Image (tube, helix red, strand yellow):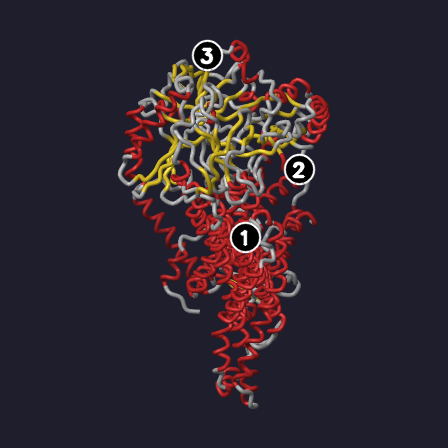
């Protein structure tokens, strides 16, 4: 019998309360009528089935009833319904969009087999992750042969290649890998096979594995591609496999994989650090254990190569290979979205509370007619869940529309596609969020509306019982103000940081500069003479295009490329390469400084006559000259860079090679002809810089024709304007700031509405009191002060903790602030002014209404 | 209570349990268990309402105004204090009658088409 009573709990409480006793009696009678254990077992089975079916049906009956009731009440107040749905949609949409990006970038396992066992190994100064470097082949070999923590280890480096023979010549990103690298990732090709150890050993003639993307776009998805010969950088290669569509490594740009040659693998220069090393931990080995073992190995290495400073090791989970900045950007976004949702919930709870109060009489009538407390709570929860569900559905639509705006926040360095999508996982999150939201803003009003049953009498005015409820509502409004202050200040700080970064002088004039790349390949352009002809013909042609004022070639563009850092040894000093300070090196053709708008300080430009048989010259940046020859004229001074002696012939302005956020090495520009044949071909000028007064769309086709005429096999790639390159550095930030500002604006508006709602409520419920005060001779000014004071108290109660939290948040994201202080006075002052405006805005109408209260009417309404 | 033909038609056809409960209450007020026993007896044991089905039907029938709870109790020696007694309303009688007519109309139509109806 006790079990039967427990079973009855499956029924809705109201049903159980009404009929439970009767049902127990019937069941008791049945039990008495049924003799024998077997028959009783049958009765139990029947009963359990009956309860399960009828309890579900009873719940469904109530739900249907509540839904009908909800539909009716919402239809009666469409303004309220619409507001509630829109507010929920904004909150859930913001969170769904933020979550889909954050989940995509931060949470989801990488698309490799057992990705949690994959680690990336860096050379580092004493395992310090802030001073990591790529790995030299020599160190890699030591690691690979000495370590026991890993199942396998492989290395790669990135290198672009020219693909010729498939329509226009193409510049493709490629990754050069050891044979064991791709198998570590545990992804099988869709066609063909991966590299073998045998191929690597015999140095076979260039097998190539294609990405799915390049197989489709360049080879039309040719099913018989495996075995076909293609031409890369003028060399024949054989396609041996095609990777799956989702496969990306090491980043999404890479179009094909090539096998590492024997010469690269046997490199003995410990300073030649350019490999990326991936390893798979043995099952059961933790990252910490692997780190401990690798530390021992690197200590041995350190003893052997004592001039090399950064031979330590840093073992990082591949999943964590994401810059702190990208992570912070996303976390800030999620935090802001959560703030918006919190405010939305508080706002809706307040709206529902206010409405519950307006419906007090109706609820009391329903109670008098026999509705139980449980039914009222349930009814109220159904209503808020329906509102939340409608808002959630609209919110997913909002997220769907907003998502493309957020793709800039997906870092290109990750092996994932560039665009997250709304998938079942995200939808599940949105559904969960909707349910939580509905409960969050519904539970307080529901509880309150049931609590009202204790209050007495239908005849009382609305003043009754206000105190407790008003405290709850005030708390909600204060929470709203607080969250909006946090959002306002955070968005403000990040916006200040963005403005600061965007106003940084890069040292060149980006406007009207168009850039594109023609990467010359070896062996065709092995000699300086061959390259010089190409530059002469292309530049000669480009300079005749109408509107072009100057054009030049350089190794690589500032900001876009940051490599090429060489040690500098001034003449007369004896330093080892490891001791020397470094400078960024670029080979340029004449006119580069004019084309880029870099100011000349002293001396001359490099010239076409600076050849190998002349004194080797260099143009240096101001900081370089000041650092090595302070107070002296740098012209004529000489330095070793990296091996040849160079004479300074000119000094130019400094350029921020590493973009606005990082300090740059001083710069050295070398004459494009002053390099030995076959040496440093990697640094041969390949980026064409064109200053022109006409739009890029008219210049580019002309340049293409010229390049095509000079060398039909030469691809043109990376066509970009210099302002675009500059903007790209801050693109992720500027998207984030825009999103945060939108969030802050929403929060601001909602908080103002919250203040407005609460004060309006105060004014209507205190109408009687205000009337009495006025009748007793209170001036309108006093009444206005009374209401305004409440508004200001509410705002202050939210602003003070809000400021404290905002300061803490600011400190948390200090690395994103580009030097703007977390307690930036301008931002805080602006936020303060905005909050005051918000309070005034929210208090305006209620205050006016209070001031217009007519004592006579107030008494009548209350009577 | 006033009601129209439309009110009656809106409820037809009745679920079998509802119809049987109305029939069981047609002549006298009964408590729930008595309804179950009556239905069981009248259908020769073929229809045995479960407690859940019974009270869910009763709840809905109360809302629809087909029956009501009654405070009139039978002779004290037969009464069980815990039990609730139900009485058919005039509307309930009308609905039950309409349902019966609807079914006999169906039977008439089937017979006119020569469908075999007598029990073998």
Indicate whether A587 appears above or below A478: above
Instruction: Give the distance between the C-alpha atoms of the residues marked 2 and 3, in whole angstroms.
Output: 82 Å
Instruction: Give the distance between the C-alpha atoms of the residues marked 3 and 1, in whole angstroms.
Output: 54 Å
Labelled disc at residue A469: none
Task: Please indicate whether residue A258 sits to the left or right of residue A468 in the image.
Answer: left
Q: Residue furthest left?
A: A546
**Residue drawn at (55%, 20%), measured in percent from left and top?**
A183
Instruction: Give the distance between the C-alpha atoms of the residues marked 2 and 1, in whole angstroms.
Output: 63 Å
Q: Position of residue A848 (x, y in %)?
A: 48, 78
Closest to the camera, between mark 2 and mark 3, is 3
**Residue drawn at (45%, 48%), measured in percent from left and top?**
A399
**Residue drawn at (56%, 28%), measured in percent from left and top?**
A640
Using a 10 Å C-alpha cutoff, classify the residue at mark 3 as few (fewer than 14 neighbours), some (14 to 19) or many (20 or more): some
Tell me if I can see residue A706 in this picture: yes
Q: What is the chain letter for disc 2?
A: A
First-in-chain label (2 vs 1): 2
Contact flag, marks 3 and 1 (Cβ < 8 Å): no
Q: Label 1, on which residue?
A: A336
Report whether mark 2 lies on the same chain as mark 1: yes
Q: What is the chain letter for disc 3?
A: A
Indicate whether B46 appears above or below B28: above
Closest to the camera, between mark 2 and mark 1, is 1
Q: What is the chain letter for disc 1?
A: A
First-in-chain label (3 vs 1): 3
Contact flag, marks 2 and 3 (Cβ < 8 Å): no
Task: Please indicate whether residue B9 sits to the left or right of residue A789 in the image.
Answer: left
Labelled disc at residue A205: 3
Q: Label 2, on which residue?
A: A38
Tell me if I can see residue B36 in this picture: no
First-in-chain label (2 vs 3): 2
């Amino acid at each position: 019998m006790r079990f039967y009573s427990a079973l009855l709990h499956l029924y809705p409480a109201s049903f159980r309360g009404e009929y439970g006793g009767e049902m127990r009696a019937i069941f008791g009678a049945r039990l008495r009528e049924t003799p024998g254990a077997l028959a009783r077992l049958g009765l139990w089975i029947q009963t359990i089935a009956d309860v399960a079916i009828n309890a579900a049906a009873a719940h469904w009956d109530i739900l249907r009833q509540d839904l009908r009731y909800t539909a009716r009440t919402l239809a009666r107040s469409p303004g309220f319904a619409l507001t509630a749905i829109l507010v929920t949609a904004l909150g859930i949409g913001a969170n769904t969009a933020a979550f889909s990006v954050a989940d995509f970038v931060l949470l989801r396992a990488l698309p490799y087999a057992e990705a949690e066992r994959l680690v990336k190994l860096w050379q580092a100064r004493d395992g310090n992750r802030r001073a990591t470097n790529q790995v030299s082949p020599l160190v890699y070999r030591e690691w690979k042969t000495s370590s026991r923590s890993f199942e396998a280890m492989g290395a790669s480096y990135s290198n672009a290649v020219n693909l010729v023979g498939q329509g226009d010549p193409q510049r493709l990103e490629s990754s050069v890998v050891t044979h064991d690298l791709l198998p570590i990732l545990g992804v099988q090709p869709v066609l063909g096979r991966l590299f073998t150890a045998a191929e690597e050993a015999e140095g076979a003639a260039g097998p190539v594995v294609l990405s799915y993307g390049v197989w489709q776009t360049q080879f039309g998805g040719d099913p018989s591609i495996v075995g076909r010969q293609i031409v890369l950088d003028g060399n024949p290669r054989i396609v041996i496999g095609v990777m799956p569509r989702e496969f990306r490594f090491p980043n999404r740009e890479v179009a094909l994989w090539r096998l590492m040659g024997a010469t690269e693998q046997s490199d003995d220069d410990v300073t030649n650090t350019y490999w990326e090393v991936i390893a798979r931990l043995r099952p059961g080995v933790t990252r910490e254990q692997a780190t401990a073992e690798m530390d021992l190995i690197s200590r041995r290495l350190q003893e052997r190569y004592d001039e090399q400073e950064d031979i330590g090791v840093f073992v990082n989970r591949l999943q964590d290979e994401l810059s702190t900045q990208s992570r912070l950007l996303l976390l800030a976004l999620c935090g802001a979205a959560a703030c918006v949702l919190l405010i939305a919930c508080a706002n809706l709870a307040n709206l529902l509370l206010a409405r519950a109060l307006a419906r007090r009489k109706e609820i009391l009538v329903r109670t008098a007619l026999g509705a139980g407390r449980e039914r009222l709570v349930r009814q109220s929860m159904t209503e808020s869940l329906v509102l939340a569900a409608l808002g959630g559905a609209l919110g997913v639509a909002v997220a769907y529309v907003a998502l493309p705006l957020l793709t800039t926040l997906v870092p290109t360095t990750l092996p994932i596609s560039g665009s997250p999508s709304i998938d079942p996982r995200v939808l599940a999150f949105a559904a969960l969020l909707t349910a939580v939201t509905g409960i969050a803003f519904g539970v307080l009003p529901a509880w309150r509306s049931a609590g009202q049953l204790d209050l007495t009498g239908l005849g009382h005015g609305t003043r009754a019982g206000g105190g407790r409820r008003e405290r709850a509502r005030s708390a909600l409004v204060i929470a709203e103000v607080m969250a909006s202050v946090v959002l306002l200040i955070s968005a403000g700080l990040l916006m200040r940081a963005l403005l600061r970064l965007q106003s940084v002088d890069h040292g060149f004039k980006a406007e009207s500069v168009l850039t594109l790349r023609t990467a010359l390949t070896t062996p065709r352009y092995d000699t300086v003479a061959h390259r010089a002809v190409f530059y002469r013909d292309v530049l000669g042609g480009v300079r005749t295009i109408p509107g072009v004022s100057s054009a030049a070639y350089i190794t690589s563009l500032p900001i876009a490329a940051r490599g090429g850092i060489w040690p500098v040894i001034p003449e007369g000093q004896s330093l080892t390469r490891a001791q020397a300070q470094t400078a960024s090196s670029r080979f340029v053709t004449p006119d580069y400084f004019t084309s880029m708008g870099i100011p000349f300080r002293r001396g001359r430009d490099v010239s076409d006559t600076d050849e190998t048989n002349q004194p080797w010259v260099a143009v240096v940046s101001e900081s370089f000259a000041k650092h090595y020859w302070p107070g002296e004229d740098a012209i004529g001074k000489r330095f070793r860079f990296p091996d040849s002696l160079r004479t300074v012939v000119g000094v130019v302005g400094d350029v921020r090679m590493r973009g606005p956020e990082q300090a740059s090495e001083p710069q050295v520009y070398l004459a494009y002809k002053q390099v030995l044949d076959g040496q440093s071909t990697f640094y041969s000028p390949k980026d064409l810089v064109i200053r022109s007064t006409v739009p890029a769309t008219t210049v580019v086709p002309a340049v293409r024709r010229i390049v095509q005429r000079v060398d039909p096999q030469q691809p043109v790639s990376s066509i970009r304007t210099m302002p675009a390159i500059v903007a790209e550095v801050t693109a992720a930030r500027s998207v984030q700031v825009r999103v945060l500002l939108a969030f802050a604006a929403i929060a601001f508006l909602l908080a103002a509405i919250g203040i407005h709602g609460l004060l309006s409520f105060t004014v209507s419920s205190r109408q009687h009191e205000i009337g009495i005060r006025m009748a007793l001779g209170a001036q309108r000014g006093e009444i206005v002060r009374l209401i305004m004071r409440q508004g200001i108290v509410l705002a202050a109660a939210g602003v003070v903790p809000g400021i404290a939290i905002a300061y803490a948040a600011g400190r948390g994201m200090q690395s994103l602030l580009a030097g703007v202080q977390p307690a930036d006075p301008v931002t805080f002052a602006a936020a303060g002014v905005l909050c005051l405006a918000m309070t005034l805005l929210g208090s305006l109408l209620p205050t006016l209404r209070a001031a217009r209260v007519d004592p006579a009417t107030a008494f009548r309404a209350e009577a | 209570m006033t009601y129209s033909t439309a009110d009656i038609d809106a409820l037809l056809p009745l679920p079998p349990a509802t119809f049987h409960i109305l029939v069981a209450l047609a002549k006298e007020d009964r408590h729930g268990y008595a309804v179950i026993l009556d239905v069981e007896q009248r259908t020769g044991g073929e229809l045995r309402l479960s407690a859940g089905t019974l009270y869910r039907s009763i709840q809905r029938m109360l809302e629809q105004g087909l029956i009501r709870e009654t405070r009139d109790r039978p002779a004290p020696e037969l009464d069980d204090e815990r039990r609730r007694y139900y009485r058919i309303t005039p509307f309930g009688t009308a609905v039950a009658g309409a349902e019966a007519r609807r079914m006999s109309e169906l039977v008439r139509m089937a017979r006119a088409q020569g469908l075999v109806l007598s029990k073998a």
